[in-house]
Image (tube, rainbow, N blue to C red):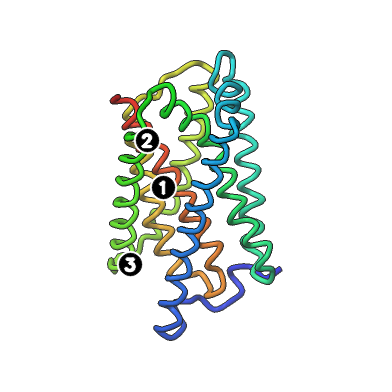
Amino acid sequence: MTSLQTRTPAVNLPEQDRAAFVIRVYQHVLAAVVAFVAIEALFFMTGVAESIYDMTWGSGGGGRWLLMLGVFMVGQWFVNQAVSDLDNPARQYAGLFGSAAIYAVIFAPFLWYVYNVKNSSSTVASAAIVTAIGFALLSFVAFTTRKDLSFMRPLVMWGFGGAMLMIVASVLFGWNLGTWFSVAMVGLSGAAILYQTQNIIRNFPANAHVAAAVQLFGSVMTMFWYILRIFASRD
């Protein structure tokens, strides 16, 4: 299996090839988003979303929600392994759409809650629009800034690690992390998008567009989750 580090970064290729690489990355981010929406729609039409909600967010579902988060993390590990196999495009695409499916499962109970308990479809649309605008602005900054953003890597890694510990503790001990935690997570997701975008441009080879898309897709979905939490808390 050829890794990301063993091939020439796209930044060292001719300008036309670099531009083509960037376009492919964002096309695949969009493809993952479309797949997520399609899978989520299927979950709602078949009643799967409601079943997941009852199982994980219903009475006594805290332990099952932690188990679900654990399965999510293991699934994402397998996704990252798949998309890093640059010699196997089929495996890469399985990882890309597998990631969309995993996020659809995680989002299903939250979206069902917003649509059916809060009865606020406009909340989801508003959160999606804000997320899209935020992602576009952050991408623009990452492409245009001359500042080396590699210093953000430990901030992002430790930040998400600490956030995961707080989420687990909140489920175990019944803590309410509140709006400010969501605001902080939106900021952390934004930092991740800035760092990942610049890292992709500078270090990823031209045929690693699927792996790059999976990284950005994950950060965008995390940002969407917490923006949606902020909007839902105000209804």
Q: Position of residue 35 (x, y in %)?
A: 53, 52
Q: Position of residue 193 (x, y in %)?
A: 39, 54
Residue situated furthest top in the rendering: 59
Amino acid type assigned to the residue bearing label 1 in the image:
Leu
Q: Which residue is mark 1?
A: 155
Q: Quadrant of the N terminus?
A: bottom right
Q: Position of residue 28 (x, y in %)?
A: 50, 62
Q: Which residue is mark 3?
A: 143
Which residue is at the front of the view, 207 or 110?
Answer: 110
Tag nearer the camera, 2 or 1: 2
Mark 1 surroundings within 10 Å by alpha-carbon count, few (fewer than 14), some (14 through 19), many (20 or more): some
- Left/right placement of residue 44 relative to residue 92 reads left
Q: Residue at x 30, y 24 (%)?
A: 235
Which residue is at the front of the view, 167 or 112?
Answer: 112
- Left/right placement of residue 100 relative to residue 81 reads left
Tag nearer the camera, 2 or 3: 2
- Left/right placement of residue 131 relative to residue 44 reads left
Amino acid type assigned to the residue bearing label 2 in the image:
Leu
Mark 2 surroundings within 10 Å by alpha-carbon count, few (fewer than 14), some (14 through 19), many (20 or more): many
Q: Which residue is mark 2?
A: 228
- In primary-sequence order, the first of circles 2 and 1 is 1
- In primary-sequence order, the first of circles 3 and 1 is 3
Q: Residue at x 62, y 51 (%)?
A: 98
- In primary-sequence order, the first of circles 2 and 3 is 3
